[in-house]
Image (spheres, rainbow, N blue to C red):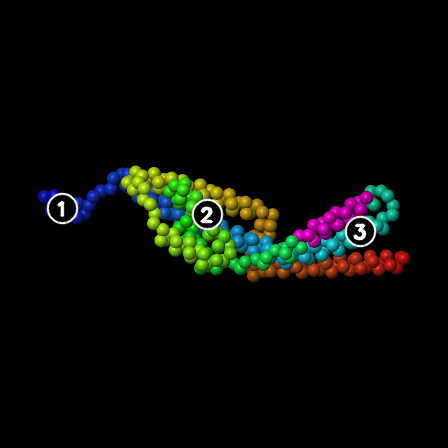
Amino acid sequence: MPHDWPMAERKVRQTPEAEHLAEQERLFSELTEQLATRETNLATLGSDFARFRAAYLIRFAPLYAELDRLEADIARILAERMHTEGPEADFARERAETAEARAAESGAAAEDVAAEPEALPEPGPDLKALYRQVAKAVHPDLAADEHERARRTQLMAAASAAYAAGDEAALTRMLDGEAARPEAIVGDDTGARLVRTLRQIAQVRRRLAELDELSQALEDDPMWLLFDTVRARKAKGEDPLGETEVDLLARINSARAQLEALRLSATGAA
């Protein structure tokens, strides 16, 4: 009799549509986790790179400016001593003009760096984990419609700014606000859920492709190779920037000695 069937035999089988929906919802969940991780990793990498750039320029821009100024003074004195006309004299004057232009440019850059605010500290693991949670909660590519997407786009921008600023309280408020926000349920039948899920999967995949492009753009920055090299060498316990500083100071001292010798010889000749 039907009412005597074991429970396992009476279990209702899922329709092919429901099975497909369940499969796509699992895929969407996996992609959502991947997206949140990628967004967090890129935001962290961008923050690390920005801090490196700021710290590097603060440390080295004044040294390069000083070296360029000394080399410009040396080139100008040598050019002034070329009383003859001809290719050698023209070359000396061109070299002096180039050195002076470079000195002016590096001096202005050093002044700009000195006026910039101090770099923010590196985000800790707790802040990184919190940002990842917020990214999962408010990411615009997880929105079901354009109105919700616009709202989430603003929230995501605010979350990224808060993360860069190390504002844990702001990220917590965003996360709590999303948890308390009632979501309207539109079209909850299997077909509507499947269409919505497929669209969300497509949106997430597009954003993952965009993140690949953003990562490549970061790596195309002229300072990226230096940043990446310094990170790799620091991981081995080396101090490449310390070596660079020692080399720059040695070049500055050498240029100062050369300039002083040129000035003394000019005084003696007079």
Measuring from the top left, give residue 59's x and y in whole percent: 63, 58
Q: Which residue is mark 1?
A: 5
Q: Residue at x 72, y 55 (%)?
A: 67
Q: Sequence order check: which comes first, mark 1 or mark 3?
A: 1
Q: Sequence order check: which comes first, mark 2 or mark 3?
A: 3
Residue 228 is covered by the magenta coloring: no
Residue 99 is covered by the magenta coloring: yes
What secondary structure is marked by label 2? helix
Q: Residue at x 43, y 47 (%)?
A: 152
Which is more foreground, mark 1 or mark 3? 3
Measuring from the top left, give residue 223's x and y in whole percent: 60, 50
Say which amino acid is labelled 3: Arg
Q: CA distance from mark 1 to mark 2?
A: 56 Å
* Relative height, residue 59 to residue 2 (above, below): below
Q: Is residue 142 left or right of residue 61?
A: left
Q: Sequence order check: which comes first, mark 1 or mark 2?
A: 1
What secondary structure is marked by label 3? helix
Per the rendering, the mark at residue 76 is 3
Q: Which residues are magenta?
A: 90-109
- Viewer-proximal residue among 196 and 155: 155
The reply to whether callout 1 and callout 2 are in contact (CB within 8 Å) is no
The answer to whether residue 38 shows anywhere in this view is no
Which is more foreground, mark 1 or mark 2? 2
Measuring from the top left, give residue 68's x and y in whole percent: 72, 53
Q: Residue at x 49, y 50 (%)?
A: 42
Which is more foreground, mark 2 or mark 3? 2
Q: Which residue is mark 2?
A: 154
Measuring from the top left, give residue 198's x and y in whole percent: 36, 40
Q: Is residue 83 left or right of residue 155?
A: right
